[in-house]
């Protein structure tokens, strides 16, 4: 789960990480008042969305006039911001962050993340911070400094000093970076984070280190078991795919994709394999959908509704391996769902496992336009062919 920049900076500030003075606002008038409280002659207005690349997309602006600030904030609020990291619909802007203007001498990059290959938390830093960090990392990875943190020892002061020296910091800045990194690592562990990123970490004109921007991603597994109630309250569902949010309410793991063949599968690994086989047959999946091991008829019906909520879906492939749950019960759920939802696209069903023959028999006797498949390759071939073929009638 992602949280907004202003929320991330609140968490950083609690741990003693220096951040700019600022206020989150939800109207143009509030934005002007925030700038007046901050004082000075320059302010930064930032759209609060769960996406990077805001600056290039016009979502971040330095302004020197209160009237201009109010107009700019008003123009952002209530619209969708499209960046390089969003789809064509963009993300809705429900709040803007107004911060003090600063004189910046240098922009650095600093991040903590989970390296799954190493099975460690790693710290990544670069002297080339700012908007171009992704391009720089891809073009010249040698500019990245990577330090691996042992879980038993935690981040050590010598590692922080190693990063400071590599970034070209000196004097009191070395101690400041050590304190900052120590606080970041403590935050990372305490809140079950999978990413905390400061880009840029700036050196101000008077030599101070300051987190000018911040991104925090929380491990969803920690939220699911109630370990982080404070962070759960920070969730903003307006920044998430509405269909994915609805699916989660029914304990369905769903991700929207760009294809036209809907997938309903039990098990994440099997779902990935199903999507791969669909692509192997020259088509594209419309979604990832894992209905889970304890699938019920009600959950199957909800899964059909969610898949069909996308107008792009031209056919559905159901691929169920009955291990924990019996295939005949799944077949009953599929029949009920097709009748209830009034499915009007081709549906191919592959059942395998416990009581699969009984399940196939139920499907065959249902009188519905449900096409059985002998195995996964056969199922993919059948649904791809069905979607490609012209249809006079409807299924269901």
Image (cartoon, rainbow, N blue to C red):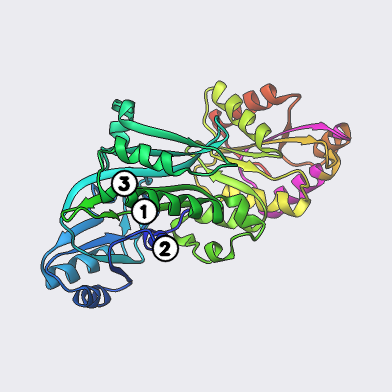
Could you classify mark 2 by the number of other residues whose Cα lies within 10 Å: few (under 14), some (14-19), or many (20 or more)? some
Question: Which numbered disc covers residue 214?
Answer: 1
Q: Nearer the viewer, mark 1 or mark 3?
A: 3
> Compared with residue 378, is residue 92 higher up or lower down, i.e. above or below?
below
What residue is drawn where x is 33% and y is 57%?
Answer: 80
Q: Is residue 29 visible from the viewing direction of this image?
A: yes
Residue 285 falls in image quadrant: top right
Question: Between 72 and 296, which is closer to the camera in this rendering?
Answer: 72
Give the mark nearer the N terminus: 1 vs 3. Answer: 3
- Quarter of the picture containing the C terminus is top right
Residue 304 on image: x %, y %: 65, 48
Q: Is 50 situated above or below 30?
A: above
Which residues, given as a range, are shown in magenta? Answer: 330-356
93 and 260: which is toward the camera: 93
Q: Does the segment drawn in magenta span residue 333?
A: yes
Asked where in the image residue 388 lies, by quadrant, the reply is top right
Label 2's element? helix
Q: Count residues near mark 3 (Cα–Cα under 10 Å), then give few for <14, some for 14-19, many for 20+.
A: many
Q: Nearer the viewer, residue 363 or 99?
A: 99
User: Considering the numbered disc 3 on the image, is that residue within a helix, a strand or a loop?
Assistant: helix
Mark 1 packing: few (<14 Cα in 10 Å), some, or many (20+)? many
Left or right, 88 with respect to 380, comes to: left
Measured Cα–Cα span from mark 2 to mark 1: 9 Å
Q: Left or right: where does residue 43 sit relative to residue 87?
A: left
Residue behind mark 3? 174
List the residue tagged with mark 2.
Answer: 7
Say which quarter of the image contains residue 45. bottom left
Which mark sits nearer the N-terminus, 2 or 1?
2
């Amino acid at each position: 789960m992602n949280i907004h920049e202003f929320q991330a900076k609140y968490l950083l500030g609690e741990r003693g990480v220096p951040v700019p003075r600022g206020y989150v606002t939800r109207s143009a008038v509030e934005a002007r008042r925030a700038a007046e409280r901050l004082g000075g002659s320059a302010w930064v207005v930032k759209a609060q969305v769960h996406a990077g690349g805001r600056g290039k997309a016009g979502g971040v602006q330095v302004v020197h006039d209160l009237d201009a600030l109010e107009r700019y904030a008003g123009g952002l609020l209530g619209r969708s911001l499209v960046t390089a990291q969003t789809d064509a619909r963009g993300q809705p802007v429900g709040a803007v962050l107004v911060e003090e203007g600063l004189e910046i001498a240098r922009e650095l990059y600093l991040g903590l993340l989970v390296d799954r290959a190493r099975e460690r938390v790693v710290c990544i830093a670069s002297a080339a911070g700012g908007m171009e960090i992704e391009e720089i990392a891809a073009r010249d990875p040698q500019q990245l400094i990577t330090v691996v943190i042992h879980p038993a020892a935690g981040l050590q002061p010598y590692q922080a000093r190693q990063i400071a020296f590599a970034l070209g910091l000196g004097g009191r800045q070395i101690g400041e970076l050590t304190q900052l990194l120590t606080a970041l690592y403590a935050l990372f562990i305490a809140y079950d984070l999978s990413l905390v990123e400061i880009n840029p970490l700036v050196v101000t004109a008077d030599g101070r280190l300051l987190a000018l921007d911040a991104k925090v991603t929380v491990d969803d597994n920690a939220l699911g078991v109630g370990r982080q109630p404070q962070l759960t309250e920070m969730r903003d569902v307006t920044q998430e795919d509405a269909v994915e949010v609805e699916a989660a309410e029914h304990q369905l793991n769903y991700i929207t994709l760009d294809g036209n063949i809907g997938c309903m599968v039990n098990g994440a690994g099997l779902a990935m394999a199903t999507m791969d086989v669909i692509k192997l047959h020259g088509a594209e999946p419309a979604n990832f959908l894992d209905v889970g091991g304890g699938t019920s008829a009600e959950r199957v019906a909800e899964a059909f509704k969610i898949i069909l909520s996308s107008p792009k879906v031209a056919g559905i492939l159901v691929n169920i391996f009955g291990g924990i749950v019996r295939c005949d019960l799944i077949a009953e759920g599929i029949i009920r769902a097709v009748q209830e939802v009034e499915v009007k696209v081709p549906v191919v069903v592959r059942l395998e496992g416990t009581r699969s023959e009984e399940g196939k028999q139920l499907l065959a006797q249902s009188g519905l336009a449900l096409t059985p498949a002998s195995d996964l390759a056969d199922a993919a071939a059948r649904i791809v062919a069905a979607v490609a073929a012209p249809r006079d009638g409807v299924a269901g």
